[in-house]
Amino acid sequence: MWREIWLICRKDLIIERRARVTLIQIVPTVLLVLVVFAFALDANPSLLGAGAGGLFWVAVLFGAVLGAKRSFDIEAEGGNLDALRLAGLVPAAILWGKAAALALQLVLVGVFAAAGLLVLYSVTVHDWLLIVVAGLCGMAAFAICGTLYGAMTVGLRSADTLLPLLLIPVAAPVLLAGTRAFDVALGTSADQGWSWTALLAVVLVTYIAVGWAAAGPLLEDA
Amino acid sequence: MIETPEPDLRQQAQRAGSLSMTGSVATRVLGVVAIAAVGVMALLALWISPPDAVQGDSVRLMYVHVPSIWVAYGGFVLTAFASARVLWRTRSGVGGTYGVIADRQARRWDRVAGAAAELGVLFTALTLVTGSLWGKVTWGTYWQWDARLTTTVLLFVTYLGYLALRRLPAESRARARRSAVMALIAVVNLPIVHYSVDWWRTLHQEASLNLEPGGDRNITGEMYWTLLYSWATFTVVALWIGIHRYRVLRLEELAEEASLEELLAQRRDEQAAGR
Amino acid sequence: MGAAVAFEGVVALLDRFPALAGVDLSVQAGEMVCLRGPNGAGKSTLLRACAGLVPVRGERAEVLGFDLRAQRRSVRPHVGLLGHRSPLYGDLRVDDQLRHCADIHRAGTPEVSAAIERFALGGRLGEVAIRRLSEGQQRRVALACLTIARPRLWLLDEPHAGLDTSSRDALDELLAEAVTAGATVMFATHETGRSRVAAARQVMLAGGRVEPAAPERHAKGPTDVA
């Protein structure tokens, strides 16, 4: 099981290393979203600073939608998902392998987006640990949601346009909690940052449980 | 000799050929009751019940707003229950005669899930519309980022997505299973959404009138009875629509089964034509 | 040896279209079967159904002793399917792809080396991204992956298409070896001139069904094909 998860994860990461879609397409898109927000808010430094936490998570959510789409495009390509099924891999291994690879790629996206915040919105970080922990929990939750819904829509006609509609409402709690935690860490709000991070962790654990239960019904059949 | 392996379904399909309506005696009675009840409800809500001391006539929106969300939640709960049944019935490794029965039950629950979700979305939309009209009258704005409204709108979008997923063409069993998974994820997600939105909004101590009954204001007398009556009326109306919707879905499936025979015959003719 | 494939009245619906409209087919273990028929006859669907990837119904649908109607999933690890699209990751290099195949099928380095040699995928070709290969080369990689998987039932859809002469010979040799080793092979093809292909039992499909069997089980040449 662990071996199979690792094989799938490694394969997706090698594909990323060869094709660099996350690095040269998704990361720039996410940074572009940060720039566009500045246009929308008239490059007002105080507005941008106050909203930085939220803008970060919205930008990363876009990245997650793109990443989830990409993650299952490569499986739909030549009937690769069928090949994985024929190899007798456990559905859960396919799901977790892909989720792990997507999570790692989203962390990469998150690092660049955080750098973007520091440079473009000139925010100051008060609590790095909170940023890192909340960030990791949020990325992992996005990755699991994205993988679940990617698996749900893989190979369907008009799946590309459906995926954001399915994914964004489910990701709303992550967006909210991540935003609140980041606002605290960036010093723009005096909320309980660690409580929101705990909520992120609860969400994450819930999705892990959902993923275990859903992998079979979602992936075992064409 | 080749037979379609589900003769029972085929018989149903033949019956479906002559069946062009989704009505039955029971639903006709139910329909008459529903229409009459709506008439009485209009009378009660618009004329007989008194205006509210604070809100005036706008309180009458409550008689639509509150039962709508009740029906919507009922629909979503039913969707979740039916979806769980679908997954339970289509566990892998179920085969043989039992498999055919299980398959039929799974289809039945899948239709229940679909019909209930449609009702849920419809009545959630009604809730949102009446809610924002009510908000316009009492708050002076169509929308407040109130916790309950925000949760409801997320719920609405989630189930819109669910219906969109159901509409995509796919093999019926795979579609049933996929939609069932999505419905269950939506339900698991609901408390998280509710809790996080609630927490998010409690930080902002804005003036938020609690308009709902059971809140800080007590509704008594005629208003109470009208509300109770509207609630019953909406339940009957929803039941009526839901049963018809279920039957339409069943007819669609039966029509597909009926045309299957024809499609198979056509397909086999290709063989003769090829010779 | 028992039956590798035992189908009676198998119907398969693809999005409501009955791609298989009642297939009766029996294939013995160790047999090589060549599926023929016009485009749209149901050859590809039959192969996918045998791989347990398509839901089927019918009186009997068994592959390698597994009942496809009930346990479609159990048969999958024992079959190898090469569809008309090659199941490859376009962004991987050839050596990445082969390693991935070997890993998921728990095959060792010797099998990989043998497959590389058989389909001439060694040397510089190993470092090329699959997307940049020609169609025939991609086909060779996919066949190499199949070799690495060592299935008990080989299902090949137009395996010869796009291959050069030496690769076709390698493929025929591979299939002959597989059969000798006790595996069963079913392939669909429009190829007529090849002796190995002709040596297989010819099964004719049309309109989603198998044509009534010709009296002679092992056709002697392509001319015998109805």
Image (spheres, coloured by chain):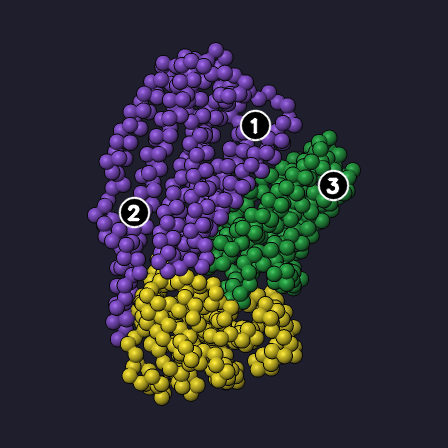
Residue behind mark 2: B251
Q: Residue at x 34, y 45 (%)?
A: B249
Point out residue C73 in the picture as x, y percentages from the top left corner. Answer: 47, 63
Q: A194 left or right of B166? A: right
Point out residue B178 in the picture as x, y percentages from the top left corner. Answer: 46, 51
Residue count near mark 1 (Cα–Cα under 10 Å), binned few <14, some 14–19, many ≥20: some
Q: Residue at x 36, y 88 (%)?
A: C220
Q: Residue furthest left?
A: B18
Identified by mark 1, the residue type is: Asp
Residue C94 seen in render? no
Residue C155 vertical position relative to residue A54 in the rendered view, above or below? below
Residue behind mark 1: B146
Residue count near mark 2 (Cα–Cα under 10 Å), binned few <14, some 14–19, many ≥20: many
Q: Which chain is green?
A: A
The N terminus of chain C, quarter of image? bottom left
Residue behind mark 3: A130
